[in-house]
Image (cartoon, rainbow, N blue to C red):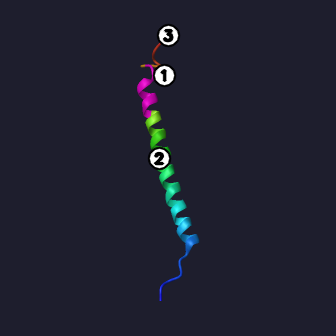
Amino acid sequence: MAMKPNYAFERRERDRKKAIKAAQKAEAKREASEQKAAENAPPGGDDPDREG
Protein backbone atom coordinates (compact mmCIF):
# COMPACT_ATOMS: atom_id res chain seq x y z
CA MET A 1 0.00 0.00 0.00
CA ALA A 2 1.35 3.42 -0.94
CA MET A 3 1.94 6.11 1.64
CA LYS A 4 -0.46 9.01 1.92
CA PRO A 5 1.20 12.16 0.53
CA ASN A 6 2.07 14.83 3.07
CA TYR A 7 1.54 17.98 1.02
CA ALA A 8 2.04 20.35 3.95
CA PHE A 9 5.47 18.90 4.74
CA GLU A 10 6.51 18.98 1.10
CA ARG A 11 5.47 22.61 0.80
CA ARG A 12 7.34 23.56 4.00
CA GLU A 13 10.47 21.86 2.63
CA ARG A 14 10.21 23.72 -0.70
CA ASP A 15 9.69 27.03 1.12
CA ARG A 16 12.62 26.33 3.46
CA LYS A 17 14.96 25.53 0.56
CA LYS A 18 13.76 28.59 -1.33
CA ALA A 19 14.45 30.80 1.71
CA ILE A 20 17.93 29.36 2.11
CA LYS A 21 18.69 29.99 -1.56
CA ALA A 22 17.39 33.57 -1.32
CA ALA A 23 19.51 34.23 1.78
CA GLN A 24 22.63 32.90 0.06
CA LYS A 25 21.95 35.06 -2.98
CA ALA A 26 21.44 38.15 -0.80
CA GLU A 27 24.68 37.43 1.07
CA ALA A 28 26.62 37.07 -2.19
CA LYS A 29 25.12 40.30 -3.49
CA ARG A 30 26.04 42.12 -0.25
CA GLU A 31 29.63 40.82 -0.40
CA ALA A 32 29.96 41.87 -4.03
CA SER A 33 28.65 45.31 -3.16
CA GLU A 34 31.13 45.66 -0.29
CA GLN A 35 34.00 44.52 -2.50
CA LYS A 36 33.04 46.98 -5.22
CA ALA A 37 32.79 49.79 -2.67
CA ALA A 38 36.23 48.91 -1.30
CA GLU A 39 37.72 48.98 -4.79
CA ASN A 40 36.19 52.39 -5.52
CA ALA A 41 37.19 53.93 -2.17
CA PRO A 42 39.64 56.83 -2.43
CA PRO A 43 43.18 55.78 -1.48
CA GLY A 44 44.31 56.80 1.99
CA GLY A 45 40.90 58.06 3.00
CA ASP A 46 41.11 56.85 6.60
CA ASP A 47 44.85 57.04 7.29
CA PRO A 48 45.31 58.72 10.71
CA ASP A 49 49.01 59.55 10.08
CA ARG A 50 48.21 61.57 7.00
CA GLU A 51 47.89 65.29 7.62
CA GLY A 52 45.60 67.29 5.49
**Residue 46 shows which numbered tag?**
1
Which residues are drawn in magenta?
A: 35-42
Tag 3 residue: 52
Above or below, 23 relative to 40? below
Q: Which one is in front in this view, the residue at disc 3 or the one at disc 2? A: 2
Camera-nearest label, 1 or 2: 2
Res. 25 mark: 2
- Give the mark nearer the N terminus: 3 vs 1: 1
| Farthest-out residue, bottom | 1
Residue 24's spot in the image, x, y percent? Answer: 47, 49
SS type, badge 1: loop
Which residue is nearer to you in this view: 34 or 8?
Answer: 8
Q: Residue at x 45, y 23 (%)?
A: 41
Verify CB contact (< 8 Å) between mark 3 and mark 2: no
Secondary structure at numbered mark 3: loop
Q: Tag 2: residue type?
A: Lys
Separation (CA) of disc 1 from disc 2: 31 Å
Q: Residue at x 58, y 70 (%)?
A: 8
The part of the image, by quadrant, that contains residue 28 is top left
Q: Compute the Cα span from label 3 to label 1.
A: 11 Å
For residue 11, above or below residue 32: below
Q: Where does residue 47 sit, x and y in percent of width and height? A: 46, 21
Q: Is residue 28 left or right of residue 11?
A: left
Badge 2 local density, few (<14 within 10 Å), some, or many (20+)? few
Determine contact: label 1, label 2, CB under 8 Å: no
Q: What amino acid type is highlighted by mark number 1? A: Asp
Q: Nearer the viewer, residue 21 or 35?
A: 21
Q: Horizontal and vertical percent for residue 39?
A: 41, 27
Which type of secondary structure does the marked residue at label 2 adopt?
Answer: helix
**Residue 30 in magenta?**
no
In magenta segment, residue 40: yes
